[in-house]
Every structure is written in C-alpha cells, then in structure tokens.
Image (cartoon, rainbow, N blue to C red):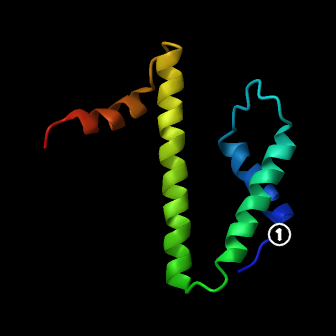
Amino acid sequence: MTITAQQLIALIQEVEREDPINFADLPFEETALRALVADHLCEMAAAMDSFSDEDRNLALLAVAAKLVLENLVLHVQLLRQHNVPMSDSASALLQRLRKPK
C-alpha cells in the first residue's frame, strides 16, 4: 500500500480532531511539522518495499510502540516538571508498574 505525504497529513489532521496535539510555543509551524513527519514516514515506508508484509507490519509496530513509549515518558516528565497531577486513568496505569509481581 502506498500513501502520499499529503494523504498522510490529511489522516494526521483527522486523528488530531479527536486527540489534538499541543504544539505549545514551539518555534515551528504546525503544518511544517506535519509535513516533515509525513515525508519521513513515507520515506520509511518506501524503504520497506522489499520487506514481506509480516516484516513490514512488525517494523511499523515497533516504530509505533517506540513513539508511544517516548510520548508517555515525555508527558510524565512534563507533568512532573510542572507539578501537575496525572489524570486518574494515567495514574492507575502507571501504578500497575509499581506493584510487585
């Protein structure tokens, strides 16, 4: 499956309607950041053209998992840095990590 950067940008914006990104005061245009990410992901996808479907899915899942983990870590760091309490659901999720098995 191929997708253009413009199509991917449209998908990003559609997802953002439900889960907006707080760009805060970054010194970059939001549209430029979306384009940069979309271009990079399209390049990554093109580099996986020779992969089997299973290997491509595994690679994309690994990339997604790494990004979600990185986002979680950055989010928790920001909350701690600004002494902002976590939501109940986030706190409950992280509490599971603290419980001994």
Residue 6 quadrant = bottom right
The residue pinned by badge 1 equals 4
Measured as percent of width and height from the top left, residue 64 is found at 54, 58
Rendered position, 97 above or below 4: above
The residue at 49%/72% (across/down) is 58
Q: Say whether residue 50 is left or right of residue 11.
A: left
Residue count near mark 1 (Cα–Cα under 10 Å), binned few <14, some 14–19, many ≥20: few
Q: Position of residue 42 (x, y in %)?
A: 75, 67
Q: Residue at x 69, y 51 (%)?
A: 15
Q: Position of residue 29 (x, y in %)?
A: 86, 37
What's the residue at 45%, 26% (across, down)?
A: 87
Residue 36 coordinates in the image, percent (x, y)? 80, 52
In the image, taking residue 6 as reference, residue 43 lies left or right, namely left
Q: Quadrant of the N terminus?
A: bottom right
Q: Quadrant of residue 19?
A: top right
Specify the amino acid type for callout 1.
Answer: Thr
Q: Is residue 45 above or below residue 49?
A: above
State left or right for residue 6 relative to residue 63.
Answer: right
Of residues 90 and 45, which is closer to you in this image?
Answer: 45
Considering every residue shown, the one lying at the far top of the view is 83
The residue positioned 13% from the left and 44% from the top of the image is: 101
Label 1 sits on a secondary structure element that is: loop
